Amino acid sequence: MADDLILYSAGQQISIRAMMSTALAPFRLFDELDDAFESARGARDLVKVEKGKFVALQLATTKEARFRVHCDAHEAIDWMPPGDAIKGHFLSIKKAITTKPSDQDMGLLLSKFVDVLQIKPGSQVDDYVEALSWKLSECPRQRAETHFRRRRQYMPVPAIAAAINFFWDTYSSKYGRPPDIPDVLNECGKHTDRLIDLYDRVDNLGRTQARLGMIIKATEDSYPDADWGDEPEPSNY
């Protein structure tokens, strides 16, 4: 995932492919981390804590039971990326959500938006781009947003790019007019929801991995007394 979602570089042109690939980078984590997310979901009971103690360890009263817990924790954590990678993803998503789009980035995204829709340039289109840019920067919660945690009055760059991509796929120009601004804002709201959901999933992934590590360390003494390698070799070996 790109560490920096800034699209505009002074004095340099950027292709549409590069622009959208950079802006949509966070959303690719849904697929890239799918196995890790599934593993974290499956480990919910294993890492459950009550009164400051792991329930699974409290219930595992024998050495054999603790060894099963140890193996289950190992199996779950093996599906997850390294802790530093999870932390890097978490910080990148947080930055994507909390960084207000610059005027340059907003101008670049929206100009490409109308260009690809083949909206003819002119003063009305310029006014549309300027008004949409302002609305995206001063945007209250939309009807499509289910999370109440978008406290900032702007749409993040990845959400704007995802909305643009949606309209490129679906919009049929109506007499040369661009999509209505309320529809664009609402679509951005849907993808802002997805970003917050991704933030929560990666946060949970990191917390789950940390707890699994604690369980593994706490049950290191549960290995059977005799491994296969410690048993005497058969006489006819």
Image (tube, rainbow, N blue to C red):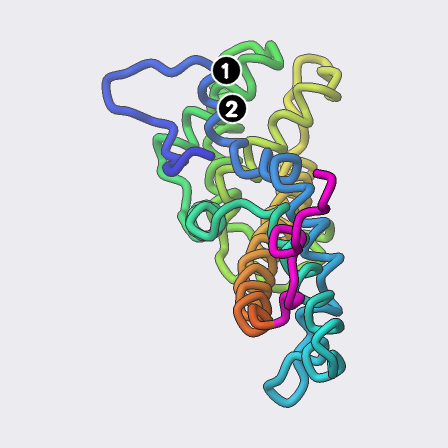
Numbered label attached to residue 76:
none
Residue found at x 61% / y 35%: 32
Q: Which residue is mark 1?
A: 17
Can residue 61 be seen here?
A: yes
Q: Which residue does the image show at 52% across and 33% down from the upper left?
A: 25
Q: Is residue 84 left or right of residue 57?
A: left
The secondary structure making up most of the magenta span is: loop
**Residue 21 x/y as whole percent:** 51, 24
Residue 223 vs residue 236, the one in the foreground: 236
User: Is 225 inside the magenta-drawn segment?
Assistant: yes
Q: Give the mark count.
A: 2
Q: Quadrant of the C terminus?
A: top right
Q: Position of residue 91 (x, y in %)?
A: 43, 51
Residue 223 in the magenta stretch? The answer is yes
**Where are the magenta residues, as a range?**
222-237
Residues at marks 1 and 2, CA–CA distance in whole angstroms: 5 Å
Label 1: which secondary element = helix
* In contact (CB < 8 Å): disc 1 and disc 2: yes
Direction from residue 183 to residue 203 in the image, left or right: left
Residue 36 % position (x, y):
64, 47
Answer whether residue 141 is visible to the viewer in this image.
no
The residue positioned 54% from the left and 50% from the top of the image is: 139
Q: Secondary structure at mark 2?
A: helix
- Give the labeled residue for mark 2: 20
Amino acid residing under circle 1: Arg
Of the pair 136 and 203, the residue shown nearer to us: 203
Across and down, in percent, residue 193 comes to 65, 50
Q: Quadrant of residue 102?
A: top left
Three-letter residue code for mark 2? Met
